[in-house]
Image: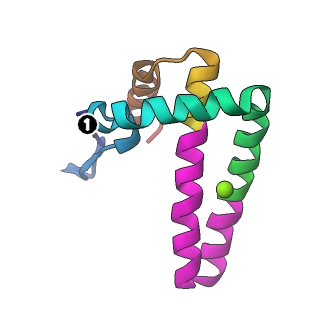
Amino acid sequence: MKEMKFKKIDGKNVGKIRIEIFEEDNGDKYDERIEEVNNYWGDQMPMLAMEEAGEFIQAVSKLERSNIKEYKENLIKEMADMMISIKALTFRYGIEDDEIFEAIDKKLEKNY
Ligand SMILES: [Mg+2]
């Protein structure tokens, strides 16, 4: 199980984040299915990921503007689409999960 600690803010440890889609236990479950998704979409996968990124942006915007419950449910669905798209692109471009975790660690250390 992959866990990352957030950086301390104001001397307090603000918690841990787990990205379950990349966890080893769930990762095995999702890896095969998402690799199939990537193979199915082939050269269209990057465009699909870009479209999903647009839908994610729109979902955040709608929720922030309205705070309507159904928009939160929509955001969750779009977050799922984003995570699937990102994972699919790791297969397309031959990126290991650990490379992403390393980048996340560096970002959390440096930028947040
Ligand atoms: Mg979507």
Q: Is residue 58 magenta?
A: yes
Magenta span covers which residues? 57-85
Q: Quadrant of the N terminus?
A: top left
Q: Mark 1 = which residue?
A: 3
Looking at the rendered structure, the secondary structure element under dot 1 is loop
Q: Position of residue 77 (x, y in %)?
A: 55, 61
Q: Is residue 7 magenta?
A: no
> Toward which corner of the image does residue 59 lie, by quadrant?
bottom right
Magenta stretch: dominant secondary structure: helix
Q: Position of residue 28 (x, y in %)?
A: 35, 30
Question: Is 90 left, or right, of 46 in this rendering?
Answer: left
Residue nearest the viewer, comparing 86 with 66: 86
Image height of 71 relative to 37, above or below: below
Q: Residues within 10 Å of mark 1 (few under 14, many from 20)?
A: few
Q: Position of residue 55 (x, y in %)?
A: 71, 58
The answer to whether the beta carbon of the residue marked 1 is less than 8 Å from any atom of ligand 1 is no
Residue at 46% across, 29% down: 32
Q: Quadrant of the C terminus?
A: top left
The quadrant of the picture showing ligand 1 is: bottom right
Q: Position of residue 78 (x, y in %)?
A: 59, 58
> What type is the residue that disc 1 sits on?
Glu
Residue nearest the viewer, comparing 42 with 18: 42
Q: Residue furthest top?
A: 94
> Toward which corner of the image does residue 106 lie, by quadrant?
top left
Residue at 61% across, 35% down: 37
